[in-house]
Image (cartoon, helix red, strand yellow):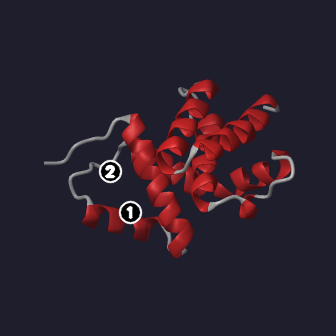
């Protein structure tokens, strides 16, 4: 039976898939097929998960350019893959998901960092996102 993930669960899966794409350098479509094969119980079509994955992927160049421009002393390629993809997802939500308040997107990114990385990463991500959000 298929089930739709809530937004937090969707963000967790999205970070994992964005990380996977960063590592294997394969397209979103290929990685979505792999996700479907690995986790067939997850409802993708029309879900928030699908929206944020497609939106982040479609806007990744703009998001990366914004990080390169605004993150003091950091370029997107120097940021670890996990942190980089948490930042990408959060910036997608901040820039393009009108129903997600900036503070919520940042808080969710910090929680993702605590789950997938460590406290130092959470502070770093908070600083980067806070600096970028101030300029918007």
Toward the viewer: 112 or 13? 112
Disc 1 + disc 2, Cβ < 8 Å: yes
Q: Position of residue 88 (x, y in %)?
A: 62, 50
Q: Quadrant of residue 17?
A: bottom left
Toward the viewer: 107 or 40? 107
Residue extending farthest to the front is 119
Residue 125 visible in the current orientation:
yes
Q: Position of residue 102 (x, y in %)?
A: 63, 28
Q: Residues within 10 Å of mark 1 (few under 14, many from 20)?
A: some
Mark number, residue 44:
2
Left or right of 51? Residue 33 is left
| Secondary element at image label 2 | loop
The Cα atoms of the two marked residues, 1 and 2, are separated by 9 Å
| Secondary element at image label 1 | helix
Q: Quadrant of residue 76?
A: bottom right
The residue under the point 52% across, 42% down is: 114
Toward the viewer: 76 or 48? 76
The residue under the point 40% across, 43% down is: 10
- First in sequence: mark 1 vs mark 2: 1
Q: Quadrant of residue 7?
A: top left
Q: Which residue is mark 1?
A: 32
Q: Position of residue 106 (x, y in %)?
A: 61, 33
Residue 59 visible in the current orientation:
no
The C terminus appears in which quarter of the rendering?
Answer: top right
The residue under the point 27% across, 48% down is: 43
Above or below, 103 against 80 in this view is above
């Amino acid at each position: 039976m298929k089930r739709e993930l809530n937004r937090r669960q969707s963000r967790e899966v999205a970070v994992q898939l964005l990380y996977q794409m960063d590592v294997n350098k394969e397209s979103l479509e290929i990685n979505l097929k792999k996700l479907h094969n690995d986790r067939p119980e997850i409802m993708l079509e029309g879900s928030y998960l699908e929206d944020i994955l497609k939106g982040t992927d479609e806007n990744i160049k703009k998001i990366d350019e914004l990080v390169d421009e605004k993150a003091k002393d950091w370029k997107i390629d120097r940021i670890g893959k996990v942190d980089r993809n948490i930042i990408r997802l959060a910036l997608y939500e901040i820039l393009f998901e009108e129903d997600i308040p900036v503070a919520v997107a940042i808080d969710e990114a910090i929680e993702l960092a605590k789950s997938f990385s460590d406290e130092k990463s959470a502070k770093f991500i908070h600083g980067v996102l806070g600096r970028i959000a101030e300029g918007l």
